[in-house]
Image (cartoon, rainbow, N blue to C red):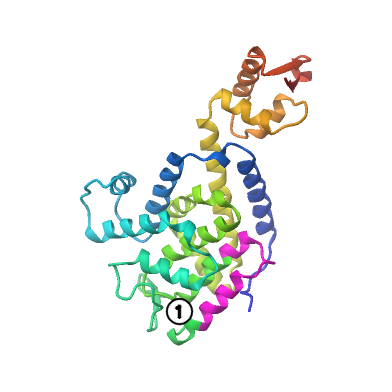
């Protein structure tokens, strides 16, 4: 059975924006992502996802652990980081629609932290916030068929991957199949689902934005619980993904040199262009930066210029 949700104007708006940004990312420099960026974003992802669950280690400490340096901190927190580093390192080897890989990932993520990692719970659980019971998870005896249904849904090729990843994240949190580690597994598996169609999501630590305002994350889960469908959570997660892509584009564009920007741009255009076209392509540079780039490219005979002021037009050599 397909999990219940509605397509809203908010969802459509974010899907259009995300699709446009993924297109920009794939057409430009980020298709040649360097190992340094991969490492930085992996550390950000692990730090953010674990800090949501109460881990106290900093990004610098996680970097030190990755580099096999000694770190002083709670043993549990160090084990959580070591486990997460292992699973993210091997993430591309997991199949997003295989339940056995899901259980294997939980076993790796929760190794030496709980009894029987990689096994579904055998007792009833509830989520308590303060003195209030926020959510009663389905009975343990229902887990097997609920999770099988959820993985059958992942195999539905007619469903948009962006929506499918959000629905799975929410439904898995609702089912709460494990005694511990459900939150980090939900975020991990959403990344894996997205990576299957859009490999760039290996480099997008959207957990960072979740960790900056965890209340919004839990409010979105709670709102969907109350409505009995994942619509509110889909809207929330698509907005997070959209913002994460914007940040990735902005930060990466800033790091490019003037010559990098010019060569990337002329590789991806076929016709004459204006300064406005150049600014539209690199959405996060100023008009002054664009003017400097284009003037330098003309002086270096990379492009030609005709016209003046607002009528200026450029062409590839």
Q: Callout 1: helix, strand or loop?
A: loop
Name the main secondary structure of what is drawn in magenta. helix
- Image position of 233 with respect to 304: above or below: below
Task: From the viewer's side, name the closer residue of 178 and 174.
Answer: 178
- Report x, y in % for residue 2: 64, 75
Task: From the viewer's side, name the closer residue of 160 and 300.
Answer: 300
Does residue 121 appear left or right of residue 239 in this picture? left
Does residue 91 appear left or right of residue 54 in this picture? right
- The residue located at (70%, 24%) in the rendering is 275
Q: Which residues, given as a range, are shown in magenta?
A: 145-166
Report the number of numbered marks.
1
- The residue located at (78%, 15%) in the rendering is 306
- Report x, y in % for residue 190: 52, 61
- Report x, y in % for residue 266: 68, 28
Instruction: Give the residue pinned by disc 1.
Output: 137
Quadrant into which the N terminus falls: bottom right
- Report x, y in % for residue 94: 48, 63
Q: Among all residues in the image, which is located at the extreme top?
A: 299
153 in the magenta segment: yes
63 in the magenta segment: no
Judge the density around disc 1: few (<14), some (14-19), many (≥20) Cα neighbours within 10 Å: some
């Amino acid at each position: 059975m397909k999990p219940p949700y509605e397509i809203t104007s908010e969802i459509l708006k974010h899907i259009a924006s995300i699709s446009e940004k993924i297109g920009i990312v794939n057409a430009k420099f980020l298709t040649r992502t360097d190992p340094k960026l991969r490492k930085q974003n992996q550390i950000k992802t692990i730090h953010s996802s674990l800090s949501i669950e109460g881990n106290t280690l900093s990004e610098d400490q996680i970097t030190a652990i990755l580099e096999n340096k000694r770190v002083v901190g709670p043993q549990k927190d160090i084990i959580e980081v070591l486990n997460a580093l292992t699973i993210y390192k091997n993430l591309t080897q997991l199949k997003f629609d295989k339940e056995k890989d899901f259980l294997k990932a939980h076993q790796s993520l929760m190794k030496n932290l709980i009894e029987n990692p990689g096994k579904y719970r055998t007792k009833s659980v509830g989520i308590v916030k303060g003195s209030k019971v926020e959510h009663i998870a389905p009975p343990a005896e229902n887990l097997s068929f609920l999770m099988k249904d959820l993985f059958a849904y992942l195999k539905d090729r007619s469903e948009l991957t962006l929506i499918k990843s959000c629905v799975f994240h929410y439904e898995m949190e609702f089912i709460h199949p494990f005694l511990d580690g459900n939150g980090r597994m939900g975020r991990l598996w959403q990344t894996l689902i997205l990576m299957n169609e859009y490999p760039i999501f290996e480099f997008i630590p959207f957990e960072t934005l979740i960790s900056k305002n965890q209340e919004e994350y839990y409010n979105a889960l709670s709102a969907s619980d109350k409505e009995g469908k994942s619509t509110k959570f889909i809207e929330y997660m698509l907005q997070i993904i959209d913002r994460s892509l914007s940040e990735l584009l902005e930060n990466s564009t800033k790091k490019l040199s003037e010559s990098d920007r010019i060569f990337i741009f002329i590789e991806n255009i076929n016709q004459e262009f204006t300064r406005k076209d150049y600014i539209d392509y690199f959405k996060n540079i100023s008009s002054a930066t664009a003017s400097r780039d284009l003037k330098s490219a003309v002086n270096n005979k990379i492009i030609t210029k005709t016209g003046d002021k607002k009528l200026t037009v450029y062409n590839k050599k």
